[in-house]
Image: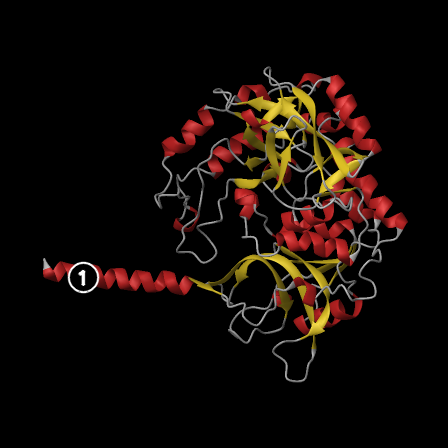
Amino acid sequence: MKKFYWIFLMIFMITGCRDHETIALFPLDHYDQTLSNWIKPSDPDYDQSLLSREIQQYHFENFYKHNFGALSPWNADYVNQILQHKAPDDLKTLEQGLFTQFSNQSKPEEQIGYGENFRPHSQNWIDTIANNINVSELDHLNYQASHRAIAVENLPARVLPTDDPYYFSYKIAGEGYPFDNLQMSSVWVGTPLYILSETKDHAWSLVITPDFIAWVKTSGIARANEKFISTWETAAKKQLAGITRTTTSMVDTKGVFRFSAYIGSFFPAEKNSEKLKLMIPIADENKQAVIHYALLSENDAAMMPWSVTPHHISYLMSSLLGRPYGWGNLYFYNDCSSELKNLFAVFGIWLPRHSSDQVYVGKQVDLSAEPAADRLSYLMANGHKLMTIVYIDGHILLYIGNYQNPHSKNHEAMAMTYQTMWGLRPNPSTSRQVVGETVLFPMLEQYPEDPKLMSQADKKHFQVSLLDDTPANHDLLHLEILDLRELMYP
C-alpha cells in the first residue's frame, strides 16, 4: 500500500505542476489602476465633448434603428428577412447542426466537451436537449405580431436551451473555466425580442434580439401587444435614459424591487423634477408586458445621448473598473466586446456584439500587415483618446491616450488602454498569464514581468477604428448583411 501511495503522490505532483504552469496570475503591481491618474479632472478637455453634434446624431440614429427601428426584432420586415432564409442557411438546419457540433461522438480529444464536473458530456446529454426542442416549429415560419416580446429580467443568452456548461479540457491553455462554449451573451431588461419557438417543456424560448438569436428562459420575458409596443416606442423616440452606475437597484413607484440594471441598459424616460422617471417592463399574471415606472437620481442614469466627455466616460469606467472578466457576460460580468458595447450605449453609440464587427462602426484602418512597432507608432500618432477602439485577434480594447511608460528609465511614451481581458499568452500558446478583470493596461512591445509573453500589438490582426468619424459605405453595409450562422453562434 505504501508503494501505491508514493506512486499516487508522484502523479498528483506532476499533474499539479502542469496545471500550475498552464495558468498563473499576471502581476498588476506596476500598472496604476487609479482612474483619475489617467483621465484627470484637471485636464482642459475633461468636460468637452469628444464627438461633434453631427457624428453623435449619426450614431444615435443607428442605435435607435437597431433597437426600435428597421433592424429591430419588433420590425416585421426585419424578422421576415430572418425567417425567409433557405436551407442550408435557415433556422431549422442551423439549429439541428448545433446538435452535431456539441455532440462528443467521433471528436478528437481537443474538441471533447466537458461539464462542470470535469467529465465529458454523454450522448444522452445532447440527445435530451435536442429532443426538448420543437424543431418542427422552425418549419415554414411566418411573422406573427403576437410573437413580439420584451425582456423583464436580465437573462443569460444560450446557444442551446440548457444551463449546463460546455468546456473544452482545462488542460489546454486558454480552455476550461470560464470559457463555456454555450454561453453567448446576456439580454438586459427592456430589450425588444421576437419569439421564434419554445422548448417542449416551455422553459426556454428561442428569440431574436437586436444583436443575435439565442435561447433564454421563458420566465424572463413577456409578450408585448400592439398597445404596449406603440406606447414604448413612442416614448423611446421622444427620450431614452441609460444606466450609468452598474447594478443599480430598480424599485418601482409602488416600492417594489423589480431588478438590478446594468450599464448598457436603457429605457424610455422623462425628467421629473430632480429625478429621472423611467418606464420599466413588468410581466402581469398572464405574462403580458405592462409598464411600471422607476425614479432614479442623475447619479444612476442619464438622458441619452449623453455628452461624450472624458468626465462622463470616466464616470462609467469607475463603476466597471476591476469587475471580473465574464466570458459571454457570464454572471452578468462583461467580456471584451460587451464591455465596450455597454460602455458606449448611454452615449447613443451602437456597437455590435462581435469584437470583429465593432471596428466597422467607425472609420477603420487595417494595420495587420505592419510590424508591432509601426502599429504602436501609428496608434500613438493618430489615435483619438477615448474614441479609438483596436481589434486584435478576437479581442478588442479602448485606447485612452499616450502616457509615460512605468518601466522606462527615459520616460518614453506608451499607448494606454482600457479593456476587459482574460490574460496574456506566450508564443507558442502553452499557458496563460491571467488578468481576469477590467483594467487600465498599457500596450507594450514587451512586458518586463515575462518577456516571453506575446504583445497585444503583435497578433495576426490589428485594426484601428475611430468612433468620432464615420465609416466608409462598404463598412456600414458589412454590418447589415444578415448572416444567421453568426447571429446564432457569435
User: The N terminus appears in which quarter of the rendering?
Assistant: bottom left
Q: Nearer the viewer, residue 377 or 287?
A: 287
The residue wearing badge 1 is: 7
Helix, strand or loop at mark 1: helix
Q: Residue furthest top?
A: 286
On the image, which quarter does residue 458 sit in? bottom right
Judge from the rendering whether residue 284 lies leftward or rightward of residue 345; answer left or right: left
Q: Residue furthest bottom?
A: 410
User: The C terminus appears in which quarter of the rendering?
Assistant: top right
Judge from the rendering whether residue 183 lies leftward or rightward of residue 350; answer left or right: left
* Residue under the image location 18 percent in, 61 percent down: 7
Query: In the image, residue 272 lies at what x, y percent?
Result: 80, 34
On the image, which quarter does residue 117 sit in? top left
Q: Nearer the viewer, residue 108 or 213?
A: 213
Q: State whether residue 168 is above or below residue 84.
A: below
On the image, which quarter does residue 206 sit in? top right
Q: Can residue 465 be seen in this snapshot?
A: no
Query: In the image, residue 274 lies at what x, y percent?
Result: 78, 39
Mark 1 closeness class: few <14, some 14–19, many ≥20 residues within 10 Å: few
Q: State whether residue 36 is above or below residue 486.
A: below
The amino acid sitting under disc 1 is Ile
Query: In the image, residue 457 lies at what x, y percent?
Result: 64, 67
Judge from the rendering whether residue 104 lies leftward or rightward of residue 426; answer left or right: left
